[in-house]
Image (cartoon, rainbow, N blue to C red):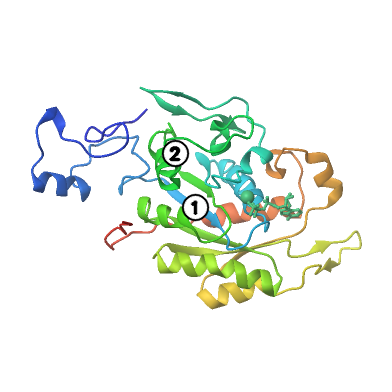
Amino acid sequence: MYSHPNKDYTGDFVATHGMPMSLPSILSILNGMNEPASDLPHILDKTSPTRVLAISSGKGGVGKSTIAANLAIALSHLPLRVGILDADIYGSSLMNLVDLDSHATSSKHDGITPPTAYGIKCIAMSMFVEDNQPVVWRGPMLHGVLRQFLTDVDWGQLDILVIDMPPGTGDILLSLAELIPRTEVLIVTTPKPDSQAVASRAAAASQKLKLVLRGVIENMSYFTGKDGIKYLLFGEGGGDTLANTYSIPLLAKIPLLDPAISNTLGKTPLMATPTECESTDIYNSLAKTLQGQRQPKIYRRELKIK
Ligand SMILES: Nc1ncnc2c1ncn2[C@@H]1O[C@H](COP(=O)(O)OP(=O)(O)OP(=O)(O)O)[C@@H](O)[C@H]1O
Ligand SMILES: [Mg+2]
């Protein structure tokens, strides 16, 4: 696992060779000026080439986890090196969506080795909780858990880390803004006006935290019948309204998946199957659009949460 020579196991900066560090050398490290040349940079480092895409919404049940899993797989087909972090610490749904081929293992020296699904490294809180036990892992602090997922998991070299966010605008978003200010946020909504209004809170919170709002993904936009007609089962306009409000693009409209397909999927995400349909085309083109974008440059001072 990559370890920063000036960081201890918990990721905090420590003096090298047991000598106290001078203020200028601490500052230069914090400014990223003394970063060692490494082809395996830490995700938290400002110079890390890993893009971080947070799939977020103020509203629950709009398809964040479904989109995170399918988008991650579509990105991996491009091919990009992709990881998924399920940041829904208390209501982890990644495990319901992906059939992992092994469990996470951890050791004091090597950190946490994430299991893979479809060639994608995955980590979720539920991997560390057995038999529905309450979450107690390095204390109950969400910030600490998220930080540990980012620092202690052996992600290897990633092009993109997809983060499946919990619903709402709570602690995890704040922590992410502090830990990775370059995080790019994708807001998921359904076409319903009321759903859009709730989803919009995550956009407002992200904007307040000065995260980059990459765009809106409208899910369950329509259902294409056998007659080829698009039925707007949940109304229309939610995605457009949200995109217009924040002056960001509406990146994709994902239709309701045909039950004839979803019934055959089980735990397997659509994009991990050979199925070709309207939705697979949309995920592929969304992945290409995102691939074509550049990682944002952050010039502001990093947010510190006391
Ligand atoms: N386009 C779609 N077509 C059909 N079903 C979908 C679609 N998108 C999501 N679903 C279904 O909707 C349900 C909710 O999806 P999902 O768990 O991804 O939402 P979520 O936003 O992550 O929820 P939570 O806020 O609880 O984490 C799931 O049963 C999922 O299979
Ligand atoms: Mg979810």
Earlier along the polypeptide chain: callout 1 or callout 2? 1
Residue 146 percent coordinates (x, y) = 44, 44
Q: In the visual, does 47 lie left or right of 78?
A: left
Residue 205 percent coordinates (x, y) = 47, 66
Q: Amino acid at mark 1?
A: Leu
Q: 163 or 252: nearer the eye?
A: 163
Q: Check contact, mark 1 vs mark 2: CB within 8 A.
A: no
Spot the residue most to the right: 227
Q: In the visual, does 52 lie left or right of 258?
A: left
Q: Is residue 135 above or below residue 217?
A: above
| Residue sitting at x 51%, y 40% | 83
Q: Report whether residue 293 is seen.
A: no
Residue identifier under label 1? 53
- Label ID, residue 25: none
Figure quadrant of residue 303: bottom left
User: What is the CA distance from the residue labelled 1 to the residue labelled 2?
Assistant: 15 Å
Residue 60 percent coordinates (x, y) = 64, 58
| Residue sitting at x 67%, y 69% | 195
Looking at the image, is mark 1 or mark 2 nearer the viewer? 2
Q: 135 or 106: nearer the eye?
A: 135
| Residue sitting at x 41%, y 69% | 208
Mark 1 close to ligand 1, CB under 8 Å: no
Q: Amino acid at mark 2?
A: Phe
Check the picture and name the quadrant holding the C terminus.
Answer: bottom left
- Label 1: state its secondary structure: strand
* Number of dots carrying numbers: 2
Q: Report whether residue 226 is seen.
A: yes
Residue 203 percent coordinates (x, y) = 51, 67
| Residue sitting at x 67%, y 55% | 63
Residue identifier under label 2? 149
